[in-house]
Amino acid sequence: MPVNYRWVITAGQLGIGPDERIPEDSEAQADLCFANIAAILAEDGMTMADIVRLSVYVTDREHMPGYRRSRDRQFPGTPPTTTLLVVAGLVRPEFVIEIEAIAAAPS
């Protein structure tokens, strides 16, 4: 990793809003995941454009299109390098997606 960059590595973000509601569909959950990531980055003066890598976990292949629609809104053009895994489950059964991000910006 270049030393002249600031790095932010987020833990997995889930699709839960400030009101603690969890939408049923993957696209709405992904939107909340990305909103949470954007808020974390903003605290360090970064934006979604600084993301260099995503790790995405979905509980079923049927959730991939919703995730992709949300991702494409966040990253018009070429999205960051992404690993997407289908997993047996997340911390609670109502969660269908979890997203981790790594961001880097010049110091």
Image: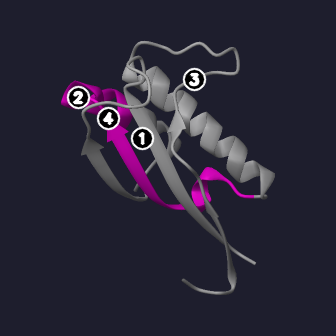
On the image, the x and y values in percent for residue 29 come to: 47, 25
Q: Secondary structure at mark 2?
A: loop
Instruction: Identify the disc placed on residue 16.
Output: 3
Q: Nearer the viewer, mark 1 or mark 4?
A: 4
Alpha carbon distance from label 3 to label 1? 20 Å
Tell me if 56 is positioned left or right of 30 in this view: left
Alpha carbon distance from label 4 to label 2? 6 Å
The quarter of the displayed image where residue 88 is located:
top left
Q: Report the amino acid beneath label 4.
A: Val
What range of the chain is rendered magenta? 46-69
Instruction: Identify the disc placed on residue 72.
Output: 1
Within 10 angstroms of label 3, few (less than 14), some, or many (20 or more) residues? many
Q: Report the amino acid beneath label 1.
A: Asp
> Which residue is painted at 38% across and 31% down in the image?
90
Within 10 angstroms of label 1, few (less than 14), some, or many (20 or more) residues? few
Q: Report the amino acid beneath label 2.
A: Asp
On the image, the x and y values in percent for residue 9 come to: 59, 60
Q: Report the amino acid beneath label 3.
A: Ile
Residue, disc 4: 58
Tell me which label, 1 or 4, sits earlier in the chain: 4
Alpha carbon distance from label 1 to label 4? 17 Å
- The answer to whether the residue labelled 3 contacts the one labelled 1, judged by CB atoms less than 8 Å apart, is no
